[in-house]
Image (spheres, rainbow, N blue to C red):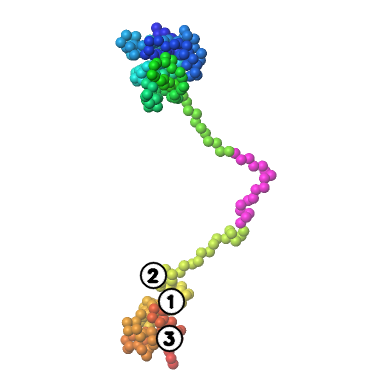
Amino acid sequence: MAAEFRALLLTDLVAVPIGGVLSAIKDVGGEIVAENDVLVITQGDSLVGMGLVTGGKLPIGSASVEVIVSVSKALDFFSEQLLEEIGRLLKPGGKILVQTSLPSNENIDKEKLTLERKLLYAGFLDVQATETKAFVPLESTKSLTIKCKKASWTVGSSFSIKKFTKTVPRIQLDDESDLIDEDSLLTEEDLKKPQLPVVGDCEVGSTRKACKNCTCGRAEAEEKAVKLDLTADQINNPKSACGSCGLGDAFRCSGCPYKGFPPFKLGEKVSLPGNLLAADI
């Protein structure tokens, strides 16, 4: 049967002062843990070779540890397999504190990003560096400490989502409120149906022919044009090949279609007098 402990100290060193570990557990927000509640595993880099890990797992129950502190003298100690095992051991919402030693002349920012990326890829949350003294100070080294936590949910867990219902606010009106009827604002003139102007046949089409009940005088003009053997275009827009048609009969040739018409200006409508076709006698 797997043993149960509230905290776990995992290191690749030979020994780590337990007092500093207990203080670190308190600093990361964990509850006060007694010394006999901490399982200490040293020389963790040789666990597999010594046969202490069965099936790639530590002899500890899953989701049974509240806090895990891992101290290493090398960054490579925090492998993907080890971080996966740490995630298995931690309870939902459990805390983890990892510390590694770096050469004093090495860029700590680069190594910090590497370790933070490993923890994030392993599924831990709230990954951030913290100022913690080295548990085991080594000569010509500096320590890097990062804390994080496991998610509060477990794989396969489910929860219901509350559906948000949007409600429209109700407006209460008193009977004594002064309301105005919209229809009362309209006058009799506003209620009358507007009379649209009637468009006659005289205005329709490019030929502009007179309508049946023409009252604008277009029918009379067309009748005169027919009698004079002229088209409507010859009357409305007169043109002359010789240039003398508009000067009068004295300047017109014998075959001029405008013979007998009063003088006019070329391009302007020919004005037909009312007595043009009336008999002289």
Residue 162 place in picture, x, y as percent: 50, 29
- Type of amino acid at the residue the image marks with label 3: Leu
Please tell me which of labels 1 and 2 falls first in the chain: 2
Q: Nearer the viewer, residue 228 or 137?
A: 137
Q: Which mark is residue 206?
A: 2
Q: Nearer the viewer, residue 57 or 179?
A: 57
Q: Secondary structure at mark 2?
A: loop
Q: Which residue is denoted by mark 3 in the rendering?
A: 276
Give, as a single range, the part of the protein colored magenta.
Answer: 170-186
Q: Nearer the viewer, residue 144 or 208?
A: 144
Q: Pointers 3 and 2 in contact (CB under 8 A)? A: no
**Which residue is at a point 50% across and 16% down the rendered structure image?**
26
Is 271 within the magenta? no
**Which residue is at a point 37% across and 17% down the rendered structure image?**
73
- In three-dimensional space, the C-alpha distance between marks 3 and 1, rounded to whole angstroms, equals 16 Å
Disc number lying in front (1 or 2): 2
Residue 120 place in picture, x, y as percent: 40, 25
Q: Pointers 3 and 1 in contact (CB under 8 A)? A: no
Q: Quadrant of residue 43?
A: top left
Q: Residues within 10 Å of mark 1 (few under 14, many from 20)?
A: some
- Type of amino acid at the residue the image marks with label 2: Ser
Residue 206 place in picture, x, y as percent: 38, 70
Q: Which mark is residue 219?
A: 1
